[in-house]
Structures are given as structure tokens and as C-alpha cells.
Amino acid sequence: MAPRKVGGINTYPTSPAGRTIAAPVLVAGHTLGWIWTDRDRCAGWWPAEPSADVPAGLISRVHGHVVARLVELHTRGVPAAEVLDPERWRPYTLGEPGPEPTP
């Protein structure tokens, strides 16, 4: 058995030229991270830091879901400006979009 090279992830560019807007991904009132877009061509995911209320394992599971969904949306040709539509993120809840949080 020999290792096989797997291609890169085909998703939105992640280097916005301008300001971004982000919406929190919420579970039971806790923020697990933020989905962001520059409303043009870039979009991505910014995971929250683990805490007593939000364990790393939960953030990791959401991370996998969000990255897979971003790849799916990009592959289907959904514009980056439309990634914050809450209907696209079920079973998770997407909070109100606002300025991207700063660390």
C-alpha cells in the first residue's frame, strides 16, 4: 500500500481585498465560530477558541461541517455574497451578520 496524493480543497478564496462581514454559528446559545464573506468573491470560516462551555471536539465537528459546506456551495457556483444565508447552514443556527470579530 502506498500513500496517494489528495488534491487541494476547492473552495472560495480566503484573502479578501476589503472589509468582511461575519455571522456566528450557534449551538445552544454558544458561538462555535464565524462564517465570513467579503460580499464579493471570498468566504471562509473562523473557529472560536475552546472553552468550558464550548469544547474543542464540538468546534472540530462544526469545522468539518462548515468547510465541507463551503466546498459544496463553491462547487455549485453559489456567490460568496450568499454564503451567510441561514438556510444554507442547517442543522446549525447562523446568528445575525456583523463586522468580523477581532481576536
Image (cartoon, rainbow, N blue to C red):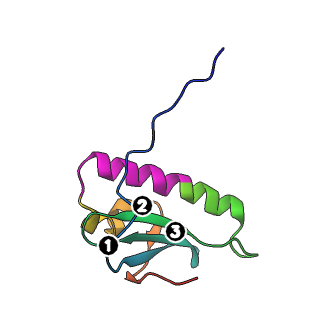
Q: Earlier in the sequence, mark 2 or mark 3?
A: 3
Residue 59: name its quadrant. Answer: bottom right
Location of the N terminus by quadrant is top right
On the image, the x and y values in percent for residue 11 come to 37, 51
Q: CA distance from mark 1 to mark 2?
A: 29 Å
Q: Residue at x 25, y 68 (%)?
A: 81
Left or right of 18 on screen, residue 95:
right
State the mark number for residue 90.
2
Any magenta on residue 98?
Answer: no
State the mark number for residue 51.
none
Badge 2: residue crowd in 10 Å (few <14, some 14–19, many ≥20): few
Amino acid type at circle 2 is Arg
* Front residue (pair 86, 18): 18
Location of the C terminus by quadrant is bottom right
In terms of secondary structure, what is the magenta stretch mainly?
Answer: helix
Residue contact at pointers 3 and 1, CB within 8 angstroms? no
Q: Which residues are magenta?
A: 64-78
Closer to the observer: label 2 or label 3? 3
Residue wearing tag 3: 46
State the mark number for residue 17.
1
Left or right of 92 on screen, residue 32:
right
